[in-house]
Image: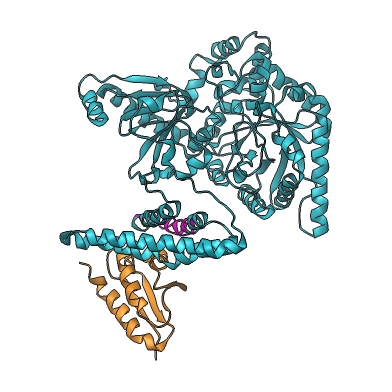
Chain colours: A cyan, B orange
Amino acid sequence: MSDTTAKHAVKSGALNVSLQGIAGSPGITIGKAYLVEQEDVDVVEKRFVDPESVPGEVRRFKEAVKKAQEQLQGVIEEVPEELRDHAYILHAHMMILKDRMIYDGTSGYIENENVNAEWALKMAVDDVKSIFKKMPDPYFRDRASDIGHVSKIILENLLGTGHSNISDIDKRVIIVAHDLSPAETTQIQLEKVKAFLTDLGGQTSHTGIIARSLEIPAVLGLGNATQLIKTDDLIIVDGSAGVVILDPDEETLTRYQERKDLFAEYQAMITRSSRLPAETTDGFHLRITANIGVLEEVVSVIDHGGDGIGLYRTEFLYLNRSTPPSEQELFDNYRDVAEIMAPRMVTIRTLDIGGDKFASGLQLAEEMNPALGLRAIRFSLQSPEIFETQLRAILRAANLGNVRIMFPMISEVDEIVQARHMLKQAGESLEKAGIPFRADIEVGAMIEVPSAVIMADILAKEVDFFSIGTNDLIQYSLAIDRVNKHVAHLYQPLHPAVLRMVHRVVEAAREAGIRVHMCGEMAGDPVNLPVLLGMELDAVSMNPISIPVIKRMVRILSLKESKLFLEEALKQSTAADVVKLVQDTYGSSFPRAAFFPPNLT
Amino acid sequence: MKFSRKVIIPNELGLHARSAAKIAQLAEEARSNVFIVKDGQEANATSILDVMALYCPCGTEVLVKIADPGDLEVLNRIVGLIEIGFGES
């Protein structure tokens, strides 16, 4: 029913309903919606099984395969005589079911890693899929989907479910969901996604990060998009403006198609110039680094001309598992990042679990107010085994690249002293074991709590650099929860209180002769660039995709003017005054001009 | 006595799912291992994924190899199957 009404509407008197959300990832796309119900996504859990239960787990897997063979045999027998010739693909599926790469591969994972059958199957299938996905011929690459299909039959037999799910989508769609957890996002075949729309979430939510790293548009915090949009509805997504248009008319479609093409051309143009250094017209060189959350993003950092990694969030490896990762697993991951980026610098932030993140494996007590609770460095200092494992892995990786370490959410000097002490102990234990590591690693503190801003002169004596984490600093300073849509509009990076805090931290760092960086979302928005440049930060770190735009902006600004501008900005009374000052000084189209060619703003 | 034979993949689609499945069916009849070798990389001929993973488009030269001389019949039938392009038009 929904289908026919939607089609009818496009033909006669379309409604052009426009929804405003938070711009999560720039770009424009036009396409069909796919509504994700919460139960659509099969989340494969990793569990460890006791050694004595391993044979039973292998048996459970083999029975699921046997059942899948019977199911497929049934399907083959039902194929009508005239279509027999096409049934060969089902015979091929039948053979893949018992193929040693899947069959022995899964049994091998169960036996060698003591994991549950579902997880072992996923690992074995991922191994095979990755071989096929690398092939130059599209026909061979597409065989990865046959393997996926076969493994899904086995998986459903293991899980005992039989419903259709998101992995069945066979065309590129715009994903519409209430909210997407990191675990759910990993279940989606990302190559099928044209854009993300969510009811909840903001710029810094996981979905926003994933969308920006994949360079697909996203509009978040839409409120009730899942109630207004139905699967197969034709919609327009403008991720740069945070706008979604339902039921568009022909004229709107044509207009957005043109915008889409212009945007793509413009993106290509600025990306080509992204390798050039970010140097102002008067010769000041601002280092532009990237924030990443997963190893795979380093490719995007290099492609977008990043001068290093200013923030490597390390939480991802800890999510959705029952035990924390091993030192070797962490080391392998950090080493890969360090080696790929070398000689460029990589700044690894220690575990920042808490807030909107979630680690099922680490037994965290329920808290009324997680943002003010046991998280980040507080959690690490109270969990010495987990912390030491991570510190050892970082010290080892530092031996193989240009690696620095920084501690999140420092709110008093004792935390730095304790963390440095544990870092020293971790080094001593490696030394004793004869494992190579780098002892003189640079140590930094994240400045993201107001008390750390006030005490910055004291903290500066204990570290080699500061990194200002503006997401939390703004949230804590203005008492604004940026994911709460009722107050999210009060989350203002250009609030004079924020500017004065950042300025204070920079001055304390200068005084002590240490370097100071910024690694919050604030750094990636061109509208903030004149004030940040005026502060003379040593580096600003942002999502890889923002780098070309910011580099381009730096090249048209001058340090001298930016310093004068900062002086004025620090005298303003409200965030609106500062925004007005930016526009009066740099032109009313200033921030949008960075994202769009002049004829689009 | 030769235990391996060189052959060029003549069909347009190369060693894809269907052709690999046909090879696997013949290889199942062997008493010992049968391998498809490309540039020194060996794939077990009974595994269609293994064979497909070798990535052999049309024109690739492969070696069909047997471990047991008793499987010479299987070797010749596989080579014959490849030579006729798996019967695909």
Q: Nearer the viewer, residue A83 or A341?
A: A83
**Residue A404, above or below A233:** below
Q: Quadrant of residue A54?
A: bottom right
As for residue B14 lying within the magenta part, the answer is no
As for residue A137 lying within the magenta part, the answer is yes
Q: Nearer the viewer, residue A364 or A106?
A: A364
Where does residue A158 sit, x and y in percent of width and height?
A: 45, 55
**Residue A283 visible somewhere in the drawing:** no
**Residue A457, above or below A86:** above
Where does residue A184 sit, x and y in percent of width and height?
A: 48, 41
Residue drawn 70% across the image and 51% down it: A397
Task: Give the magenta range.
Answer: A125-138
Residue drawn 59% across the image and 60% down it: A113
Where does residue A84 sit, x and y in percent of width and height?
A: 20, 62
Residue furthest out toward the bottom: B1
Residue furthest out toward the left: A82
Question: Main SS of the magenta segment?
Answer: helix
